[in-house]
Amino acid sequence: MNPWKSIALSDYEAHMALPAVGQAAMLAAEFAKAVADVQPRSLALVGCAGGNGLDQIAGTALDRVICVDINGSYLEQLTARYQRTIPHLECHACELEGFRTCGTVDLVFGGLVFEYTRLGEAIEAVALLLATGGVFVALIQMPASGMPTVSPSPYAQALDGVVDFFQYVEPGVLAAVAAARGLALGEQRSLVLESGKSFSVLTFTKAQPGG
Ligand SMILES: C[S@@+](CC[C@H](N)C(=O)[O-])C[C@H]1O[C@@H](n2cnc3c(N)ncnc32)[C@H](O)[C@@H]1O
């Protein structure tokens, strides 16, 4: 069973927000950058947890904001936080791999979620969700020597369950899986936090069918 179903959002968020971990701020900043670059009318945040980053779009006029997460209680808390400030907010509690909806969005952002998915199925869901010409941004964790998967913190024990489930996603593999589904890699950037943890941000565009 996916361990994320039994991790308290408070433990996860407290861990990510610790200055020594520093990942919550990094993820929110990358989401904000993607929104600023793409200027979408609609977007999806997949593996959204409690909505880290959504305060960046609060009050903006988007036609549709889709949030997907396997943990329904995270989405309840996300809804309580954002339903008044984000119009057209839709939350879907399910595996990303099986997520299907009517219509498409201009931007799909997934930060530190693909490490916990069946990659081909997850990227298939992203490709179907994305409009032609739309942009997909994936932020993935890179191996760094001497760095544990989950950084040491007072909350790390609560996150123990994810360590065995976590699987690094190799950027070349992600690019190939995405290309097979019509998502063409544009930019790839590296990020290294003060903790030494390293990440890769890959940006894809959905090509015209047959294009
Ligand atoms: C490491 S957290 C990243 C959360 C978030 N992106 C952030 O900025 O903090 C991984 C998230 O993905 C969710 N998740 C894990 N596997 C999933 C799956 N197969 N489908 C949908 N969500 C999943 C977890 O519940 C969790 O909220």
Image (spheres, rainbow, N blue to C red):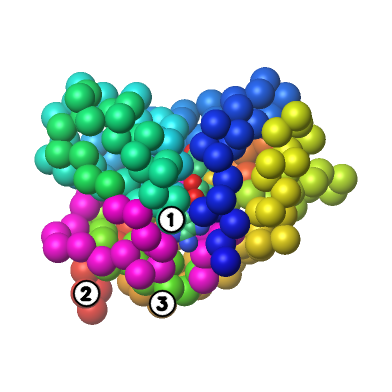
Q: Earlier in the sequence, mark 1 or mark 2?
A: 1
Q: Residue furthest right?
A: 146
* Residue position for label 1: 70
Amino acid type, mark 1: Ile
**Which residue is drawn at the image coordinates 22% and 45% (left, top)?**
90
In the rendered image, the vertical position of residue 74 relative to residue 23, given as above or below: below
In the visual, does 108 lie left or right of 5? left
C-alpha span from label 3 to label 1: 25 Å
Along the line of sight, the residue nearer the viewer: 198 or 20: 20
Residue drawn at x 26%, y 59% as measured from the top left: 130
Say above or below: 205 vs 195: below
Rendered image quadrant of residue 151: top right
108 relative to 82, above or below: below
Q: Label 3's element?
A: loop
Q: Which residues are magenta?
A: 92-118
Q: Seen in the image, is 105 located left or right of residue 184?
A: left
- Provide the secondary structure element on which disc 2 rests: loop
Q: Tell me the residue at 52%/64% (across/down).
A: 117
For marks 3 and 1 on the same chain, the one whose residue lies earlier in the sequence: 1
